[in-house]
Image (cartoon, rainbow, N blue to C red):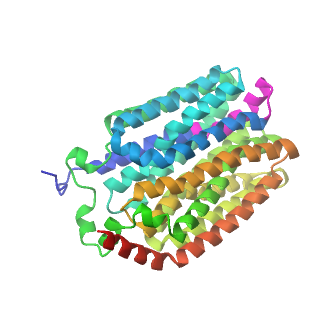
Amino acid sequence: MIMSNKGKKLHYAWWIAVACCAIYAGSVGIVVACAGLFYKHVSTELGVGTADIVFYTTLMYFVITITLPFAGKIFSKINMRLLLSIAALADALAFGLMGTYTSVYQFYVSGVILGIANSFLIYAAVPLIINNWFKVKMGTVLGLSMTFMGIGGAISAPIAGYLIETIGWRPSYMVLGAIVAVITLPFTIFVIRKDPKEKNMTAYGAEIAETSSKKVVEETGTSLKHAIKSIPFYALFIFTGFLGLVVTVNFHIPNHLLSEGFSTSYAATVVTCVMIGQTSGKFIIGWLNDKIGIKLTSFIGIGSGMIGILLILFSGTIGGASIYIGGLAFGIGYSCSTLLPPFMIKTVFGNRDYASIYSMIMSASTLAIALGTTIFGFAYDLTGSYYVVFLCVLAIQVLSILIGFMLLRRKAVSANNEAILAVNEN
């Protein structure tokens, strides 16, 4: 018999949330957040351009783009604990072994491995798991979990900067890779469960959800077949892709600051500010979504990112604390890339084919990051600065707000029509 979870014992869903926090802290907080701190040092020693070394990141996101649409089906066929444990180990090894590489092509191999691993760790697993385990406070819990992307980065960035300057970039990769394994593997092996049924339980807040007036829409929702024929699906796809392009700037902030004459330690401090902004932003965005809705939340989040871009863009002129403020503001905008799409998908399409729809739409983000990372790197190599890149990103952010607002204006009608279609299908 399935447990009702009405006792005073802490619901296992909260241990799931802790595990999701650890996964994000290791995979994003270290592997992704610290990547930009190594670019200049690696490219200098190997005698290649910045774009050449950045290309491993492009490969990572390109592979994620290819893998992500199949992730939902893979989760239904393979034990999630086993799959995520293999992914976590591969993530740690592929990142740590970069410290031994003597050719840029070896970085590309790691990029492919990181892409496969992180398609599950970063994008597919956590939103699906939290959606399964939490019937109430889903937005707040997902936002809280994602704050650990920033917490991990805020802690690891200054450590990475210090290590690079004291022991060199090669040992630094190895140390950070080991930390990734220590942070993620215990939770993927011993804690993670795909859904409450694996623990003979019901989801947190299931009793409350049963009395909700939204229950029919949330539990039925829209089938993938109908979703991919709708305008909101493609609007969300473009919107998510634009948010992904904005995220790409984070990989280049350290190089931008180094090119403006700042030290590696200073650049690491700004990265820490970005991660702190991302940390607070994910919690705030998640909380705001539950309180005031997705429309105003989107405006606040993306608008903060625009302010951050402007302050970082003119770092060489204004200097001082304003760059740190820019990092914090950009971090809030950064948090929108992984947080806003799941909220919009659930609001518009419901739970019926959530995993499949989510995987397809999020592939827009990973494809945009894959393309943007290298294109922005080439732009820097050609022009010697990031001014053109940052101005283009500002324009993309404006378009993101406009597309998001147009999408949400027709959300209510679309959601109601699609829910009716889903009910008729049943």
Residue 120 or residue 223, whichever sits in front: 223
Q: Taken as a whole, is the magenta stretch helix, strand or loop?
A: helix
Q: Bounds of the magenta span?
A: 31-49
Give the percent coordinates (x, y) of residue 106: 65, 25
Task: Indicate whether residue 32 is drawn in magenta.
Answer: yes
Residue 340 or residue 257, whichever sits in front: 340
Give the percent coordinates (x, y) of residue 232: 53, 69
Q: Is residue 330 left or right of residue 279?
A: right
Give the percent coordinates (x, y) of residue 137: 37, 62
Q: Is residue 155 left or right of residue 77?
A: right
Residue occupying image coordinates x 59% and y 23%: 97
**On screen, 314 above or below 186?**
below
On the image, which quarter does residue 404 sit in? bottom right
In the displayed image of the protein, which residue is found farthest to the right?
383
Residue occupying image coordinates x 42% and y 60%: 140
Quarter of the picture containing the C terminus is: bottom left
**On screen, 276 above or below 240?**
above
- Residue 123 shows in this picture: no
Give the percent coordinates (x, y) of residue 401: 63, 69
Residue 290 or residue 90, whichever sits in front: 90
